[in-house]
Amino acid sequence: MADSPKTVLIIDDEFASLEVMALLLKSEGFAVLTAGDGEEALDVLEQHPVNLVVTDFKMPRMDGGELCLRLLADERFRALPVIMASATYGADIPKPLNVVAFFSKPVLFSALIVAVRKALKSP
Amino acid sequence: MSETETAQDIDPWAMERMPTGVGGLDEVVRGGLVRGAIYLVMGRPGTGKTTIGNQLCFAHVAAGGRATYMTLLAEAHATILKNLQNMKFFDPSRINNGLSYVGAYRALRDEKLHGLLERIRRVIMDEKATLLVIDGVSPARALAESDLALKEFVIELQMLSVMTNCTTVLLANMTAEDANGPEHTMVDGLIELSFEHHRRRTLRTIQVLKFRGTRHLLGRHELSIDQNGITVHPRFEELFDGSACPAPASDDRVRTGVHELDGMLHGGFLRGSTSVALGFSGSGKTSLGLHFLHSGIVAKEPGVLFGFYESPERLHQSAARMGFDLRKAQAEGHFSHVWQPSYEFALDELGTRLLSELERTRAKRLVIDSLDGLRQAATDPARTIRFVTALLGELRSRQITTIMTDETLKPSGPEMEMRVEGISALVENLLLLEYMTTDSKLRRLVSVVKQRASSHDDTAREFFITNHGLQVAPDARSAAEVVAEAEDGAPHNRRPRTPDGV
């Protein structure tokens, strides 16, 4: 029996970015969940098992930085890897420990998928 | 902190450009399409949308990219390919070898815009396309559930293009007047192909209405479609700033080939200067041009005659009568004759033809015979002076010594005038060729009205058109007789002080 697909939670307040990233990751065989900001992401995480988080940095209500800190503070999510992207901040912004890769937006999918596979240790 | 990476294949903000492969278009958009951006090319049927879409694809593949031409409700692929077969860019070996043709209407019809987006996603990923042309986007508009859904689709398509680094070009059968939909506001670039009608003449034009990330050349530019595919002819005065070009710097002289005239010019024209030879029909302007070019042939300075009236055969015969073997010079690469009827090409296309011939031949001398040909090619008469200003500036910057002929409305007299107002102020040198009748005999005079930055002989000389070309009298005595006799005769024979107010 084939392994069940790994689940990626994408968090972005930009509609097109969220939709297209979901479309592309699904096409690569991942199960995809989406959320519009950090608070919504925490709700999703309470309800579904997730293997990787891909989040925008700047978002309303709860931004990506705060979300990372909240994940680190929660024993259930501490080991969950996070890929972060931002259109307004560069790679030199302070990154919480659970951030395994950072991208400046717009993100090239060819680069993102490499980071996703590496974070999930999938081929 | 665990290992953190900043992985990115390229810097997306570096605005990596992709040459279009459409002659002149890269100049208009100053460098080509932006990779990963989305463009809308619109126009009525017959304006060249399908041609430009395919030309982009073939050029992209020839440059090492991968392209997909996707149709919705458009011509059959076989029809498109059949119509392209005479185009030089068409290379059948590229089809299914870097360039694919796919249909996507069924996905759109069955699953609306979500289905189309998924089809596009699949094509980009499967074909590894770096350029996608979508022909016939009107059905997407027609089948959109709402304006909002269409807007979402365009934004998603834009994001898909960015994330996959695949430049997307949409072809739409509409005009700028219809350009108020979401697809127009969301795209990175908006290009319109259209026809312009001037009396019985129709010009193809291209206008870049929007191009994010660059200062493109505004306004309409002429466009031609022939075996080379589409060629854009950017407006000359936008490309070349004539006023910025310096006057001739050196005292190096370029001989006209007419001995006594060179004496009147105190050695010849300054290298890189521009001149107008002004005179009535039959006054010897073209002969003077031939002398000038032949003198260049002797001096191993290649020359170009850019003409509108004398066919190559007639020109060779005229030159042969003067003892000049232009065929031989042409075969040896010292002379080139570009001949075209003035009504066949638009002004900027003529400019492109001229400059490319000057580059090809590495010409040092140029004769434009005549300014009237340029004037007739201009659909907007007011543009002639701007075009000529830009052209002369470019010729000066290339150190090409130029003579333009221009026909006066009368053979002599105070009413003599140049047809393009202001030309005389643009050129360094002005030669006047006139003729008068004395005792029922035609007598010709030549004078150097001005020679900027140089002294010159300011007397008129009589000259003769002989079997060996032009011969100028060694002094001004006979000219003085002609003028005196003419002033005793008909009033129209009275010599002007200055043509064109100079």
Image: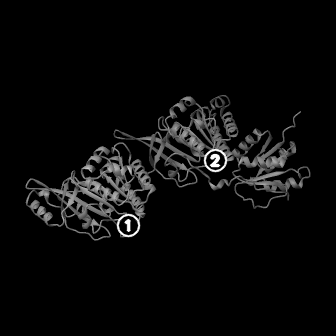
Residue B137 appears in the rendering: no
Residue B130 appears in the rendering: yes
> Nearest the camera: B399 or B203?
B399
Describe residue B270's horizontal placement relative to residue B74 as left or right: left
- The percent position of residue B29, horizontal first and vertical second, equals 53, 51
Q: Residue at x 72, y 42 (%)?
A: A19
Describe residue B122's horizontal placement relative to residue B21 as left or right: right
Looking at the picture, which amino acid does disc 2 mark? Gly
Quarter of the rendering containing residue B128: top right
Q: Quadrant of the N terminus of chain B?
A: bottom right
Q: Residues within 10 Å of mark 2 (few under 14, many from 20)?
A: many
Q: Residues within 10 Å of mark 1 (few under 14, many from 20)?
A: many
Q: Residue at x 41, y 59 (%)?
A: B394
Describe residue B454's horizontal placement relative to residue B51 as left or right: left
Q: Residue at x 67, y 43 (%)?
A: B160
- The percent position of residue B469, horizontal first and vertical second, equals 23, 55
Looking at the picture, which amino acid does disc 1 mark? Pro
Residue at numbered disc 1:
B248
- B247 vs B156: above or below: below
Q: Which mark is residue B36?
A: 2
Q: Quadrant of the C terminus of chain B?
A: bottom left
State which chain disc 1 sits on.
Answer: B
Q: Disc 1 or 2, which lies upstream in sequence?
A: 2
Quarter of the rendering containing residue B242: bottom left
Distance in Å between CA atoms under marks 1 and 2: 46 Å
